[in-house]
Amino acid sequence: MNHTIDHWLKHTIVGLNLCPFAKEIVGTDQFPHFFSPAQTEFEAQDKFLEVIQEMVESSLSSALIVFEDWEVDFENFNEFNQAMNELLEDIELSDHMMAIGFHPQFQLADAEASSFAHWPNSSPAPLIHILGHAEIEKVASLVLGKEISRVNEERIKNMSEAQRKEHWPWKF
């Protein structure tokens, strides 16, 4: 799974420029990957807390938690991701960190099921990207957030089916 995630990050997220900040950190020590064998929400939460502690102790600005063995559907994973953001509030870290969820069946609430708008957040496995304060500020300062989403959707829509299969084989 490690190779698959690295390939997806470099080839799809950075290669297609789906995230304007990814190029700076993907493949660097600034963006460590934590692979979790969690198969339940409780195990996943334990790993999330471990990574949060590591981020605080090591002053990491960003981290990725990959739940490579967790067979969880998108709806339940999305609820878990929301719960982790609430947990960050409860432990008074929500001003310093934010959890962003990615999933093979990722769906935006406000887009049609067939929309390519979902694809940038469709990952090979369920994962959470924890953004630190500096990254949150970058994202918050992006007035063009909606524009990036629109450009990404259009870019993917204009790809051939073969190209989409190359970048997101799990969707086929």
Image (tube, helix red, strand yellow):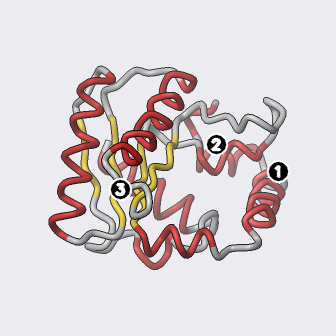
- Report the residue at 57% width, 38% height from top: 169
Secondary structure at badge 2 equals helix
Secondary structure at badge 1 equals helix
- Mark 3 vs mark 1: in front: 3
Residue in front for this viewpoint, 63 or 138: 138
- Report the residue at 50% width, 49% height from top: 100
Contact check, label 3 and label 1, Cβ < 8 Å: no
Label 3 to label 1: alpha-carbon separation = 37 Å
Name the residue furthest bottom. 24
Label 2 to label 3: alpha-carbon separation = 38 Å
Label 1 to label 2: alpha-carbon separation = 12 Å
Answer few, some or many: residues within 10 Å of disc 3's Cα (few below 14, many 20 plus, some between 14 and 19). some
Answer few, some or many: residues within 10 Å of disc 2's Cα (few below 14, many 20 plus, some between 14 and 19). few
Earlier in the chain: of badge 2 and badge 3, it is 3
For label 1, the residue is 157
32 relative to 98 in the view: left or right? left
- Which amino acid does the dot numbered 3 rest on? Leu
- Which amino acid does the dot numbered 2 rest on? Lys
Earlier in the chain: of badge 1 and badge 2, it is 1
Task: Find residue 142 and name its label.
Answer: none
For label 3, the residue is 93
For label 2, the residue is 165
Secondary structure at badge 3 equals loop
- Mark 1 vs mark 2: in front: 1
The count of marks equals 3
Answer few, some or many: residues within 10 Å of disc 1's Cα (few below 14, many 20 plus, some between 14 and 19). some
- Which amino acid does the dot numbered 1 rest on? Lys
Q: Quadrant of the C terminus?
A: top right
